[in-house]
Amino acid sequence: MTGADTRRALHGEWTKLRTVPGQLWTAAGLAGAMVGGTALIAASAGRGEEGVLAPTALSLSGVYLAQTVAALVAVAVVCSEYPRMIRTTLAANPRRSTVFLAKAAVVAAAVLAAALPAVAGSLAAGRAVLSGDPEGAPQLPYESPELWRAALGTVVYLLLVALLAVGVALTVRHAASAVGAVMALLYGPYLATLIITMPEHVLHRIQQLSPMTAGLAVQTTTGPGTAPLAPWTGIAVLAAYAAGALLVGWGALRVRDA
């Protein structure tokens, strides 16, 4: 792999992204989904009641909607070339690993560029809405290390969700199926804990192993609480899912897409 090959692959993937309006609008929509989702969830939270989410997590709760948009961006970048155009891409750049890295890098850059303002706007919107509740829990000051960790951790969370979706999309090669698989992986374990009655130790184990509930432990700012894992331990669990999906996707691109 040469520097010229890498630059050419990156330029090609970036050109595909910026010349397809739907993909750019989807990436831009991540910020709107994050801020709008937070405002709605924060506004609907019971006034003066002790909710499940602490004020900081509530101010970042739009992540539940934004993660879907992050997955859509990744799936769009990968699956837009299947089943035919991928042959053209691989003919222009036969190095599968270079193509794989370029796709992952472009997705990561697009989601990161959208996630940073999305999280900042979400915090501002959530805090503005919650400030109208005189009986609510006190909010952390902006200079608080816990607040910064929760905010930056949420950016990392969205980035890892996008990379997870890249791996799934390369493996599945069908947009609807890839989005469905990612959503099932994120929301499936959580929904199962709501529907199925299970012993507490089983519930706790599922929360520890679920990529969404483990990863979002990074938003915890009030002690262990109901978070299944320590903040960065939870992110590490999600990172393991993303790494595994990327490894499988890379293998599929090398072996199957000849």
Image: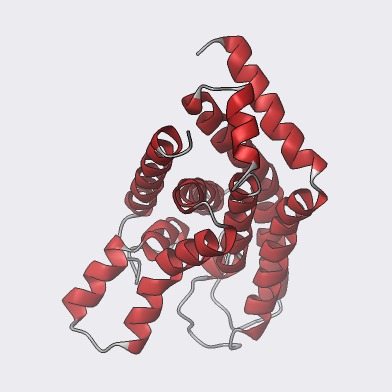
Q: Residue visible at 63% across and 36% down?
A: 106
Number of numbered callouts drawn? 0
The residue at the point 59 percent across, 19 percent down is: 6
Residue 59 in percent (x, y) is at: 61, 66
Is there any visible trace of residue 21 in the rendered image?
Answer: yes
Q: Does residue 178 lie above or below 245 as drawn?
A: below
Q: Is residue 206 left or right of residue 153?
A: left
Whether residue 230 sits left or right of residue 124 in the image: it is left
Across and down, in percent, residue 202 comes to: 19, 75
Question: Does residue 141 appear in this view?
Answer: no
From the viewer's perspective, is residue 160 above or below residue 251? below
Left/right of residue 158 with respect to residue 109 in the rendered view: left
User: Who's the residue at 41% across and 57% down the image?
Assistant: 215
Horizontal and vertical percent position of residue 46: 58, 88
- Residue 210: x and y in percent read 34, 64
| Residue at (58, 58) in percent of width and height | 175
Residue 122's quadrant in the figure? bottom right
